[in-house]
Image (cartoon, grey):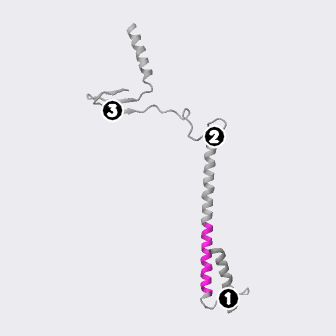
Amino acid sequence: MRPKSGYLAMLILFAAGSAGAQAYKWVDADGKVGYGDTPPPGAQVSAVRPPQFSAATSTPAPGATDSKKGVLTPAEQDMAFRRRQADAGKKTEQAEADLRAKAQRDESCERTRQYLTTLESGQRVMRTDATGERYYLDDDQVAQEIAKEKKTYQASCK
């Protein structure tokens, strides 16, 4: 019985010593599959991946720290993630609002520019009064409209 217990002790020591070493899988020339930390020469070798740990034993993401403890809890990480999502949503909404405002301003400037072009063309400009009657602007009224529209254009469009 002595030789078996000595062999078992050697096997345990060998297993404990090689627990952190890289493990390999190989197929020898006879087609037999072998495992170990040192493959024989001339064999087809592939590295064996170490076992994967569960989420409960994993370390927190880098940068996920709390000033008190040093590590954020999953609930705190979730809250921080939701806060970042909300901030990104607000930035997107603001950018869209800015684009809409710019488009409206550009459209208004284009209408003002077209009206100025019409006023300066020398054509007769017709308007409708409150009762629905049509009337034409005289030269003084056209000059006043041109001055007013130029001020508006310079203030809003440049």
Assess disc 2: are there few (<14), some (14-19) or many (≥20) residues with their C-alpha within 10 Å of its C-alpha.
few
Q: What residue is at 67 percent from the left and 78 percent from the top? A: 152
Q: Position of residue 7 (x, y in %)?
A: 39, 13
Q: Position of residue 82 (x, y in %)?
A: 62, 47
Q: Which residue is mark 2?
A: 75
Please check the rendered image and state whether residue 103 is part of the magenta-colored stretch, yes or no. yes
Total residue callouts: 3
Please check the rendered image and state whether residue 158 is part of the magenta-colored stretch, yes or no. no
Q: Amino acid at mark 1?
A: Ala
Q: Which residues are magenta?
A: 100-119
**Regarding mark 3 in the picture, which secondary structure is present there?**
strand
Residue sitting farthest toward the top: 1
Q: For residue 76, which quarter of the picture?
A: top right
Q: Amino acid at mark 2?
A: Ala
Q: Earlier in the sequence, mark 3 or mark 2?
A: 3
Do labels 1 and 3 touch, CB within 8 Å? no
Q: For residue 58, which quarter of the picture?
A: top right
User: In this picture, is 60 found above or below 125?
Assistant: above
